[in-house]
Amino acid sequence: MRNVFTKVFFFLAFYSLSFSQVFYEPLGSDVYSFLNRLSQKGIIELDDQIRPLSRKYIAGKLLSVKQLAEKLTSLETEELNFYLTDFGRELDLLNNVKVEKEKISSINKDQFGRYRLFSYRDNIFTINLSPILGAEIGSRDNERLIHIWNGISFYGYLSDNIGFNFRFIDNTEKGNNIDKWRLFTPKTGFHVRNDETIFGFPPDKIEYSEVNTNIGVDWSWGKFSVGKDFMEWGYGESGLLVLSQKAPSFPFIRLDINPVDWLSFNYFHGFLASDVVDSNETYYHETGGERIVYREKFIASHTLSVKPTKGLTLSLGESIVYADKFEFSYLFPLMFFRVNDHHLSRQINEAGSNSQFFFSVSSRNHLKNTHLYSSLFIDELTITNIFDKEKQRNQFGYSLGASFTDLLFENLTFTLEFTRIFPFVYEHYIQTTTYQNASYNLGHWMGSNGDLIYGSVNYRFLRGLQATLWAQYIRKGDKGNAYLQYQTQPQPPFLFGLRKNYTYFGGFVKYEILHELFVKFSFQLMKISEQQEDLNYRNSNLNEFYFSIYYGI
């Protein structure tokens, strides 16, 4: 079966080489928020339900904005010119601009006026190379923390066929209060073994690395890529229900189809980390220790998005997490995954997989300068007993959000969001089929059996300089276990168990001095109220402050 998969993969890859190139802009880039605000004001149409977006697509949108420059504020005009400098090569691709001789620069501005460590371009080959360097010093619960990182990134094009990018970062964190597991935070999780006898890490230090890469092609009505990266689905500042950056990135193949302006389709097949040891495959090696082998884990997902009118997008998606062996049928983009699982498992639950459905609505500028958005994530729903409190098993989550920009005065944006996730969402009694990668949720960082209300205000003072203040309140119940999830009737109510309440107040000031060169100050004040066995609450506080300077997104 693996040989069949390999042949199909290479057939798609080589077939695609007859088209033009594509690769994706990192999700941390501020160009996303820039385009989002302009689409929120009705200046452009933006298809960003699933991110990251390709640099070529972003360049096309910047070109559209340039043609409507009279609708921009003075600050937006400066921001546009800043991004046009960064996307100069992609604009040339769109306009089919050729060069008479090679263009090369080192530790200087490239031909578009953008500083780079190294840049080379001719009509066959383009590469842009940048360092990644950063240092952060801060305080967490009155203990000093230091975070140092370094790495390298590059991207480029080969002829008219291949686009590629690569990003590697090596991290070192020091301090007595390092958050080693990142369990209840929107920060991306990682797996670090802190066993001093094996890795030599002292209790106040961790080291870990990150790598993301893509290679892909596009044509007039679609894109195809392979790589290892993050993906986001839907909208939200406080967290995303379906796909977020909470879990580490994973390898995937991805297909995007846009046959007409009002219809788009996305499919991907990903390879996840199960963290479940395969005891049958694990064996002893020559030094007497165990060679550990993990169970295989996969995800397949597809989404159909429709735009019935300008500014309105309706999206419907399905995914399935399956394990133990690769199934060729999940490579079919139009497959109905849930029905396919019934066929493969012979409708035996213990042989089956874990499927999900999700839906979203996005409305931009139907109310002036306003983005209204909502997502629904269904992990399990018993249609026949949906309103029967004794027999229902309704495990789903939903979010509602609204963003308002330039309403009181220019460059000011307000955001309000509410999210509720009912018990046992993202969980499964078969531990290899949870909606997780490397033991972190693929969706919302808050997890199941909780809700949150979030608000923020953002102001952009000048090109690259912005400040955000935000507040958030979370109610969180117990996680529960498989017995409560599958054997108990009626199911435990929302917020069952001993409760925790979290009250947050935070903010940051960030300045992008040059392309990818940032200074940032951020803080977060958190009050935690934990319910005890006697039902009284015990309060504690956790305050964090950080200052950082870094180059590279």
Image (cartoon, rainbow, N blue to C red):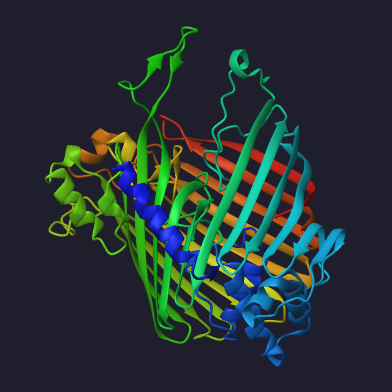
- Residue located 59% across and 69% down the image: 160
Which of the two residues, 433 or 16, is positioned nearer the viewer here? 16
Vertically, is 281 above or below 153?
above
- Location of residue 292 by image quarter: top left
- Residue located 62% across and 58% down the image: 26
Residue sitting at the far right: 108
Which of the two residues, 211 or 316, is positioned nearer the viewer here? 211
Which of the two residues, 403 or 11, is positioned nearer the viewer here? 11
- Residue located 79% across and 78% down the image: 78
Vertically, is 114 above or below 28?
below
Which of the two residues, 369 or 6, is positioned nearer the viewer here? 6
Q: Position of residue 291 (x, y in %)?
A: 44, 18
- Location of residue 377 by image quarter: bottom left
- Residue located 82% across and 63% down the image: 104
Q: Position of residue 432 (x, y in %)?
A: 33, 36
Q: Position of residue 426 (x, y in %)?
A: 36, 46
Residue 169 visible: yes
Left-right relation of 273 to 245: left
Residue 405 visible: no
Vertically, is 162 above or below 135?
below
The quadrant of the picture occupied by the N terminus is: top left
The quadrant of the picture occupied by the C terminus is: bottom right
Q: Position of residue 448 (x, y in %)?
A: 39, 46
